[in-house]
Image: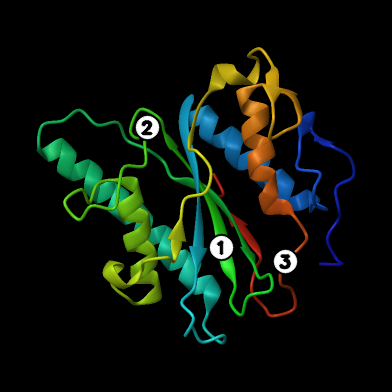
Amino acid sequence: MSNHLIHQGSLFNGLPVNTNYSLITRYLEQTHKVLNNALSEHPRSFIFTVLLRLPNDTDNDLNLERMITRFIEGFKRRLQRSIVRRKNKGYRVHATSVRYAWCREQDSSNHQHYHVFFLLNGQTYHRLGDYSYENKHHLRYMVADAWAKALGMSIEDNKGLVEFPGRPVMLNIQDITSTRRYCKYVGREANGYESVFYWMSYLAKVDTKQSGNGFRSFGSSMH
């Protein structure tokens, strides 16, 4: 990670960032772009994060970059199929773009893991739902199933490998200029937009990122 420019200070473009870690400037820039692009298209955006773990018997030589790509593309396909099914049943369903940012980490465990943020149209989705096999259009199920398939396993064998840390957030574009209130996570007054960027800035931390193995430690949607 020595080739990366490290961000200095508690603000990035005027927005608070997580100062518990050293942060990589380019990753902050990309994360900021993802958040702004989401709000530009969907002024009401639903934002959630997921932690993806690898099974204990995972081969360390596995192409992890291909795996995270399979997961994201698989999640997109499941979303679109769900929307089409709901429309075919006569429901009015809004379209959604799928924006995301992810980082790959490894701490003291034997295997690496991923943190992924997804940003969707808040008029299409407003909650995660559950894992019930009877509710395959729920976000929780679609995420877990997409990760299971990316790993080459069934969702029934995927228990403990998918976690949804933190509460999802419904962010409105008006939150950019809304009144600031004290936020215990930020440790200062912040509006909704600032709080979400602080939350997402975790992805840019230097600690636990792996380098020199030919795989990226960060990725995001481009538009």
Q: Are marks 1 and 2 in contact (CB under 8 Å)?
A: no
Q: Earlier in the sequence, mark 2 or mark 3?
A: 2
Residue at image coords 17%, 39%: 86
Give the amino acid type for the residue marked by disc 2 in the picture: His
Dot 3, crowdedness within 10 Å: few (<14), some or many (≥20)? few
According to the image, label 2 marks what residue?
Answer: 126
According to the image, label 1 marks what residue?
Answer: 114
In the displayed structure, would residue 106 be above or below residue 9?
below
Give the amino acid type for the residue marked by disc 1 in the picture: Tyr
Dot 1, crowdedness within 10 Å: few (<14), some or many (≥20)? many
- In 3D space, how far apart are the residues under numbered discs 1 and 3 (Cα atoms)? 11 Å
Q: Quadrant of residue 216?
A: bottom right
Residue at image coords 76%, 43%: 18
According to the image, label 3 marks what residue?
Answer: 208
Horizontal side of residue 61 vs 82, given as left or right: right
Quick one: SS at disc 3? loop
